[in-house]
Amino acid sequence: MKTDIEIARKKKLIPISEIAKKIGISEKDLEYYGKGKAKIQNTKGKKQKGKLILVTSINPTPYGEGKTTMSIGISDALWKLGKKTLVTLREPSLGPVFGTKGGATGGGYSQVIPMEDINLHFTGDIHAITTCNNLLCAAIDNHLFQGNALEIDENTIIFPRAMDMNDRALRNITIGKGKNNFERNDSFVITVASEIMAIFCLAKDLKDLKYRLGNILIAYNKKGKPVYAKDLKIEGAMTLLLKDAIKPNLVQTLEGNPAIIHGGPFANIAHGCNSLIATKLSLSLADYVVTEAGFGSDLGAEKFLDLKCQLGNLKPDVIVVNATIRSMKHNGGCSKEELTSENLEYLEKGIENLLVHIENMKKISNHVIVCLNHFYTDTKKEVQFVKETIENLKVPFHVCYAFEKGGNGAITIAEEIVSMCQEKSTFKPIYSLSDSIEEKIKKVATEIYRADAVIYSNEAKESLKKIKKIADKNLPICIAKTQYSLSDDPKKLGHPKDFSVTVRDLKLCSGAGFIVVYMGNIMTMPGLSKTPAYENMDIDEKNIITGLF
């Protein structure tokens, strides 16, 4: 079969102005970024009318399980049913593109294009966020150098530098070495885990963006009082850097249907959802909006539902739980070499992971659909086993062939979604914003992860005390933990039992408006694998790219 990039390259781009017309956007509201990309200028004053469809997943393997492929396929299928639809996604990070996972524009015949541009620099949004982040870092150190009028205690600075690349060497660094410099310890996070990215994705508009940027907690002074970005008088300059980035990006699917891609936080170390501006704009333009949340439902979906929906006053109409035979066998302990051969023993054990995710989503919504993302290595026996297991739960089940057939491969799923949306949906978040910080953590840990207990390190206890003194008690939480397990230990696959989770530390992101809870040994700056994806990438003298997927 042809590679994703070969399939994408053969599809001729439809002028983006024509794509915009399909959802009622006029040419005067577009800012063009080449032939196939544009930013949408007017995002205000539109009534939200669309049905919100969330695509989530079971715990993944390191290679991705096709949520984006399924989301695009469902959107294309809804168009085939005559429904005005938008697929609204996150922007790919260069970290995974050049690392292990590769790009995030779908696959096979269910992609968004131009895939090379989207997977690389796109419209420059993530670069703008990186620059904004590092401007604040430069301002902090300049303030120290210029006399430290705010009396910042340099040992309490909590705002790190950022770069959109996997680089473990930058996790802990020393800056300011040399004569007349101010030397101190610092660190980098990957841009998609930065607070600036979170602010970007939760801001309502430019005014709210500026307010949130100014409200970033950067350190404490020598009297123990909080110091914010606005104390450096920098929020205006930071907002300038994001004035274009904040406008949502319009592209198209392989089938010539509109797609909005905007914002890109990871879900394991950040909140895992595209921008609130893009989601609300999409709901005002389309009858159906298909979106995804990163990694498994224990991470991305939980944050989408408890954090984004509660802060943004959103409600999902349908939740689609994506699964693959490969990921279930992986969760059953199957080795990489055995994943592509029939093995019901590993599948029977690994399907327990899927069952937990289904049960969790049913706690939140009455409209849950399970979809098996079909791979060519799946056997009839394996598919039949999954089908029978899920149908015994009285949950709708479908096999998705979007990778092979595009929208035609997701018609039955689209029909199920339309049928479900005729009935009233229920929505009950796992926790209330009025719960205490500890109650929120406990509810997610026990009801979603299925942990027996939550343990706090001494460092976490101290951080919690500090946060309680200055934070709004109604802030949601954003738990940073491994994506590979329901627990905080990546080695505990499937449905782990008899375990506790450990809160290593907490951080107040007062600009974003949530509290980050670090569990286990999760790192906010990933590293590259032994054989990174970049080793297979190249470009020739005709500008033909190979190895990008």
Image (cartoon, grey):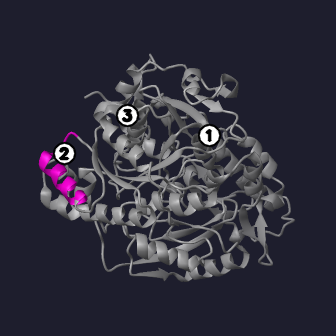
Labelled disc at residue 125? 1
Residue at left offset 55%, top offset 79%:
438
Residue at left offset 71%, top offset 41%:
44
* In the displayed structure image, the side of residue 517 where residue 69 appears, left or right: left
Mark 3 Cα shell of 10 Å, populated few (<14), some (14-19), many (≥20): many
Q: Label 1's element?
A: helix
For disc 3, the marked residue is 110
Whichever of labels 1 and 3 marks the residue nearer the N terminus, that label is 3
Mark 2 Cα shell of 10 Å, populated few (<14), some (14-19), many (≥20): some
Vertical placement of 178 versus 94: above or below? below
For disc 2, the marked residue is 378
Residue at left offset 48%, top offset 50%:
166
Q: CA distance from mark 3 to mark 2?
A: 19 Å
* Residue extending furthest toward the top: 542
Q: Label 2's element?
A: loop
Where residue 547 appears, x then y in whole percent?
36, 32
Q: Is residue 332 visible?
A: no
- Bounds of the magenta span? 376-391
